[in-house]
Structures are given as C-alpha cells and as structure tokens.
Amino acid sequence: MKKVFIDAGHGGKDSGAIGNGMYEKNITLPVALKVGEILTQHKVVVKQTRTTDTFVELKDRAAKANKWGADVFVSIHCNAFDNPAAQGTETFSHTNSTRGTALAKSIHDNIIAKKLYTKNRGIKKANFLVLRETKMVAALTELAFITNQQDATLLKTKQNEFAAAIAKGILDFLGIKYQEATAPAKGTPIIGTSKATINQMQEWAKNKKAHQTFIDLAPTFHRIATQAGINQALVYAQAAKETGYMKFGGVLNATYFNPCGLKTSQGGSNTDPKAHQRFRNWEEGIQAQVDHLALYAGAKGYPKANTPDPRHFPYLKGTATTVESLGGKWATGLSYGTDIVDLMKEIEATPAGSQIKINLLGRPITANGKLENGVNYLTVKGKDIPIRDIFEEALNLQVGWENNTVIIK
C-alpha cells in the first residue's frame, strides 16, 4: 500500500496568515483531514502532521514524514499579501525535484479543473523547508489568498471541494483510480430526539456518582438541545465525557462553565487552559455546545448569528452528521463518537426514578413522583399531578428547585 503524509500548515500558537476574519490554520486542518479521509477510502495509508489545533515545528514535519517512510508528502497552505488585490492558486515543488513537479502538476490541475480558483498562478519551484528536507516526492499547495475577499469566500465555503481536488491529484499521481464518495456510513444522527426523559438523565447521572451540578443541570441540557433539534441524550453524554460528570480534573474546572472543552477562536494546545473558552454561566456554555453540534450536523438555520460558540466556523457545517463521525473531528480519538453513543444507550436504558425529594416548609420528605421534561409530578392514586398545581395553584405556596430537591415555601 502507498503511504501519504498530509501536512496541515501552521497550527496552535502559529495562526499562519490572517485575513477576512479567518486564520490560515483553521482552513488547512479541515482540508487536510478531509484529504486523508478520501485517501483512506481508496486504501491509501495516511498519516497527518496534526489532527487538532497544535503547533509543530517545520523541521519536525519533514522529520516525521521521513521517519515514517512516506511515499508522498503534501503540504496545504493559504496565501497572503499586503495588496488585497492579489489572488489565485499556485502549487510548488522543490527546485531540484522532477517527480515533485509531476505531483504538484497533478494536484494543481485538479484544483483548476474543479474551478476552485480566481486566478491560475501556475506550478512553481521553491526551496521551502518541507520540500527541501523531505526524502520523498513532495508538493506544497497554496489554495488561495486569505487576504483577498473573493478568495476568502472560496476558502470558507469550498473546503471539501479543495480536499477532493487535492486527493484526486495525489491518487492520479499514484496511478490509483479516483472513485466518487459513496453514501455515508450509517450511524446515530446528531439531529433528532432522544427517548430519554430528564428523569432518566438524572437517574443515570446519579448512578455514575456525578457532581450534583451535573444532575441539577439536566433540565437545562434537555431544554437547549430540544430547542435546537439536537439529540438531548447526546448533549448530556458528551458533557459527561468531557467534564468527568462535572468533577473535571483536567485543564478546565467549573469556573469555565465549559461543558464540552470548546476552545477559543484562536485555539491552541489541549493542555493549555488559556486556549479554552470561558463562558459567563452554564446556560451560555451549554448553548455554545449545542450550537457547535448543530453546526457540525448541518442543522437548519446554522451557522447562526449571535451564538456564544467561539468556533462557529461556517466551513464546519454538515461535516459530521452522526455522533460516530465526531471522532477525529470534535476530538482527536477516532473512538470519541462511539464512546458517546455507548453513554447515550446507557441513559436511554436507565429506569426512571419513582420517588422525588421535597423540602416542604423546611421539612425534608420523600414522595412517590417523577421529574419528566422539566416538570415535577406527585403520584396520587396512580395519577401524576404537577406539584405546582397542588402547592402553587391550590395552596398559594412558592415552588422552586434546588440541589435535586423540590423546595416549597
């Protein structure tokens, strides 16, 4: 099998070029990951310089490819220039490489054939380190100018198309017939409704010995997910996985109000607390999580304005429609999505609690009842009656909710 090393330019503290509200590193990464996905479908063995927003030294990029023994090395970049009128696509090989020129031409011709350019700047030679230091056939493509408004639109909206053109160019060079993508694999849709109730979510969290805050926030997770049309059990399960059931223990803590490890728009290392977004409260943090999932899933109305999601990049829309496909995209681990699916199944299989805690005028009691879809019920002679109907409507008392207990004053 052929081995191809894909190099997503820049990353982490190195944003690359900046223009029209975008960072180069946030364009090259999704393109590189998609190239790898397409090549893998064609039985090509792929390794990436990076699969997350991390910094890698230039010399280490070439060294990794050399050590792995790659047959082909392709580096993906965006161009920039002080003059915003500069635009177009160009592809490079090393000054002394004939085979590299053939690879660069194959990639470049496919980009041009798909009309992913404003100006054809041609195939060129350069002494870039990653071309000079790699021991295999290598090429570097500059997709378009991030500093040019027309080009920036292409970079924002045509990333999958760029990836397909680069992948086809590599396959053509390797003599492997390109096949159009087949229907996506079946999985668990991100968009949809879970059969799990709030009560089941809370009982599951209790069984997991979750922090009380996580248990108390179940109605909020359920409500915000429902409003966006996103599977409620998914949102709760993902937050459990990311925060350790809100016991944390990693680089984040509860003061971030960040239920899913979202980073700032600039991003950075997974181990850098400053690279992660701080939200004002749990409501805002959960909304950001749901908006990010909805964007990945391609939900109607997304991308949307006025979202607290700091990484609400339009190019993400529709790139992960199933929970399973979040692996390698939301997080590095390929099992990330399947791990969440397993937790979702646990939630939906959890029996709903049959009792509810009540603090009645300062007196703690336990009564038959349930919490369902954010409403507390008491079970009286086999009938479920909303607690508010009993105490607020009939007795003119105040009903609240605190620490998993109904508070009646």
Image (tube, rainbow, N blue to C red):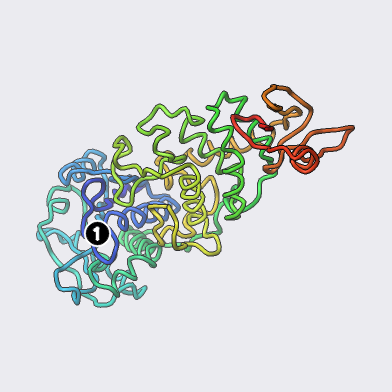
Side (left or right) of 93 relative to 383:
left
Viewer-side residue, 118 vs 234 = 234
* 163 in relation to 214, above or below: below
Number of numbered discs: 1
Residue at the location (63% across, 33% down)? 202
x and y percent of residue 394 in the render?
A: 80, 41
x and y percent of residue 37 in the render?
A: 42, 52
Residue where numbered disc 1 is placed? 77
Side (left or right) of 19 relative to 114:
left
Q: Residue furthest right?
A: 381
Viewer-side residue, 394 vs 256 = 394
Side (left or right) of 317 relative to 389:
left
In this rendering, does residue 18 appear at all? yes
Viewer-side residue, 274 vs 328 = 274
At label 1, which amino acid type do we have?
A: His
Q: Residue furthest front?
A: 396
Side (left or right) of 182 relative to 157:
right
Residue at the location (47% across, 27% down)? 247
In this rendering, does residue 110 appear at all? no
Question: In the figure, residue 165 lies in which quadrant?
Answer: bottom left
x and y percent of residue 118 in the render?
A: 28, 77
* 164 in relation to 353, above or below: below
Residue at the location (78% across, 42% down)? 389
* 358 in relation to 35, above or below: above
* 101 in relation to 233, above or below: below
Image quadrant in which the C terminus is located: top right
Dot 1, how many residues are within 10 Å of its Cα: few (below 14), some (14-19), or many (20+)? many
Question: In the figure, residue 382 lies in which quadrant?
Answer: top right
x and y percent of residue 406 in the render?
A: 67, 32
Question: In the figure, residue 87 lies in which quadrant?
Answer: bottom left
Viewer-side residue, 306 vs 40 = 306
What element does badge 1 sit on?
Answer: strand
